[in-house]
Image: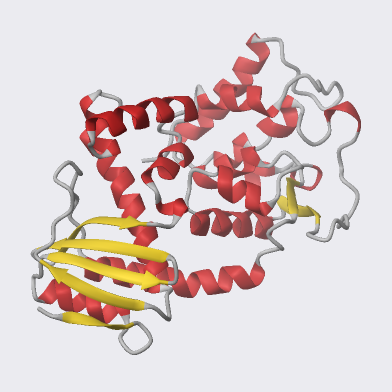
Amino acid sequence: MALAGNLETASLENILQMLNMNKSTGELVLIRGSKRIGIFFIDGAIVYSQSTIPAHGMETILIRRRRLSQADLQMYMALQKHSNKDLLAVLLENNVMTRRECVVCLDFQTDQIIFEALGWEEGTFYFEEGRHPDKTVILISRNPIDLVLEGLRCIDEWREIRKQLPARDSILEIDFKENRDSQALSLTQAEFNLALLMNGSRTLNDLCALSSASEFDTCKAVLQLMSTGMVRVKRTGDGQPVRPSTTSGPHASSERTFEETISLAPALLTTTTYRRAAVKVKGLAKGRGLPFTHASPDPRVSIGRIKGLVATVFKPRK
């Protein structure tokens, strides 16, 4: 089928639905300025997608989701170049990732690309019928209708989130002093992981770059943490402090006391597993001789060490 046009007059959601209903096979190409997105279909299902936007690259996704270190990524990219195969195919062949793990990363990539494309209000498109992705790539199967519905919901929610977010270069920090009774809170694992990244010197942009979640989910978690009072803006984008920090001295900002960080753990007491985990973390602290009383803060306990302790007992929620 011959299909081409302008996104100003033809909505992407209608295009995706039509390709699905017609059980089309080929590549839908979207172009806006220097940005190019390719979405491959087989019998109306989305099986692969690619984008020239750096944030959508599989290399970036593997680092953000902590599947590979930067050093390992460079090594396997060299293998990829030598073998002329897709990066995930190389990782699968070398038993670095399972097929299921590869599919999860591809699903995440597809979500991000479709979400980006649904937000385009200008640009051109064309459908190249019969075109298939490279033979070495791992294919998935996604229903375009489901992606459109979820994408449009996220777009509406994203607009509201952007209105409430602080400036992107604002520094965010945990407000420990006002949240001693953390058992009254209920954090998701994503919110807990994000809170661990806040060391009093990172901006919202930094958090989005470091988080393993998407920018949308990261910003949503930031707003949720701010709404509970657990997170506040330490310094605005113009460099003006919002109010004096509650920490001072050698254990301010990048290094926290064990007690301050571990106070986040009881906020996860939504199941017996997490309740036990919180107890185990405190037990680990005692076993290693780490203090966890505010009367004797220990500036030597850095956020990196805390993350290591927490990672030994907290497992991602399925």
Whether 32 is drawn above or below 281: the answer is below
97 relative position to 317: left or right? left
Q: Quadrant of the N terminus?
A: bottom left
Q: Which x, y percent locates residue 313?
A: 50, 24
255 relative position to 305: left or right? right
Q: Residue at x 60, y 69 (%)?
A: 162
Residue 226, quarter of picture: bottom right
Residue 48, quarter of picture: bottom left
**Viewer-side residue, 69 vs 174:** 69
243 relative position to 124: left or right? right
Whether 24 is drawn above or below 286: the answer is below
**Viewer-side residue, 186 vs 233:** 233
Q: Which x, y percent locates residue 169?
A: 72, 56
14 relative position to 236: left or right? left
Q: Residue at x 31, y 55 (%)?
A: 50
Q: Which x, y percent locates residue 34?
A: 44, 66
Q: Which x, y percent locates residue 100?
A: 23, 38
**Viewer-side residue, 72 vs 21:** 72
Q: Residue at x 33, y 78 (%)?
A: 124
Q: Residue at x 71, y 51 (%)?
A: 231
Q: Is residue 315 visible?
A: yes
